[in-house]
Amino acid sequence: MIERRVLVLPGDNIGPEIVPEAIKVLKKVDEIFNLNIEFEYGELGGAAIDACGLPCSNATLEKAKAANAILLGAVGGPQWDHVDLEIRPEKGLLAIRSELDLFGNLRPAIMYPQLSHASSLKPEYVSGLDILIVRELVGGIYFGKPRGIRTLVDGEREGYNTYRYKESEIRRIARMAFEAAMIRGKRLCSVDKSNVLEVTVLWREIVEEVAVDYPEVKLSHMYVDNAAMQLVMQPKQFDVIVTGNMFGDILSDIAAMLTGSIGMLPSASLDINGVGMYEPCHGSAPDIAGQDIANPLATILSAAMMLRYSLGAKNEAKAIERAVSSVLDNGLRTGDIFTDGMKKVGTAKMGNAVVKALELSAL
Ligand code: IPM
Ligand code: MG
């Protein structure tokens, strides 16, 4: 029998509001399809700092290593602005990504037809949009050493980071992106800045090397500045995009907004064996925390990705995605995706509606 041990890390601000909605949905799926999912809970980010002084304790790391998948809400917020950069909530997230070697970050930006009017772009530019951003997640400038803030001999301070990628790191993310392209539209765009940065000259070279194994995939290359522009100008030209850690961070926020709201975007962060952490792409949204207005759908859709990629339950993942779609068909909208004529609901009501849709589909 497939083991399905899930570590749940609600995190901070809206995290503890949206995660329970995804758990409700997973429990309903479990009830209908008998998946025997076991849930365990842990702390990460600000919640962990408050509890033990560190954004990611060894206890949380051990639990994460023992789980088959991790479901994360979001971390961070102004409550922890004063703490040292070294132990900021975000460092907890980076630590868990890195310790578990979750190098492959999949961020699908899909336009639900029901939401084409919620995008800031005209519907004709975004209707039918279906992009997958594959972001390298445990290397690049986020992790490169040396890094720090130092005082120079003249007394002036200097901040510095190091952008580096090893061939093996580029190769494995490129492979993951080609594999993803093979089961989609067979087009891959690798994004770099090889007109300026040596790291990405190597990136381009290795991606070309890996491409030899995937003759069916049409590979193109784009500089990151152009890619940002093309994403808002003609987003439908893209199928799969592969890029490094920081470029992927930025481009995935752009892609998210094309779909109407970052509140709809799930993500998966995978290791080489398919163990993964699943989290919505949006942050912890401190400005709307505690009001029951956050959109739980990105987290619910992340739970669906978790079933698909780490828990061997593809059909059940589809059932969740269909349930989300039917809730949108019924006109239910949280504030971030609200348009005239629709029915505005809060976080918990949206979660309940997805549960109800699952129940109905099981009848
Ligand atoms: C993301 C976030 C994180 C990142 C932060 C919270 C560290 O922006 O997952 O996109 O930069 O990777
Ligand atoms: Mg980001």
Image (cartoon, rainbow, N blue to C red):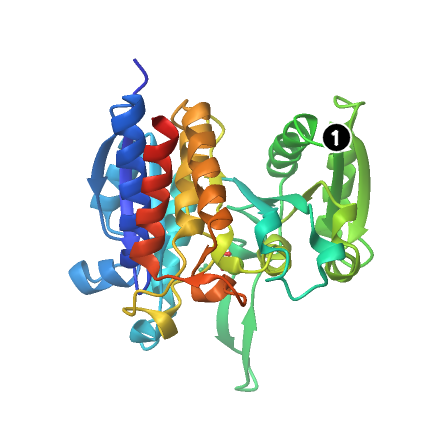
Of residues 18 and 292, which is closer to you in this image?
292
Three-letter amino acid code at the position of disc 1: Lys
Within 8 Å of ligand 1, the CB of disc 1? no
Secondary structure of the residue carrying numbered label 1: loop
Left or right, 357 with respect to 154, comes to left
Between residue 165 and residue 102, name the one nearer to us.
Answer: 102
Q: Quadrant of residue 156?
A: bottom right
228 to the left or right of 9: right
Q: Position of residue 229 (x, y in %)?
A: 77, 62
Say if residue 291 shows up in the picture: yes
In the rendered view, tell whether residue 214 sits above or below residue 43: above
User: Relative to 327, does residue 333 appear above or below in the rendering?
Assistant: below
The residue furthest left is: 51
Q: Which residue is mark 1?
A: 186
Q: Nearer the viewer, residue 111 or 255?
A: 111
Q: Is residue 11 left or right of residue 101?
A: left
Q: Considering depth in this image, is 193 or 107 the residue closer to the camera? A: 107
Q: Quadrant of the N terminus?
A: top left
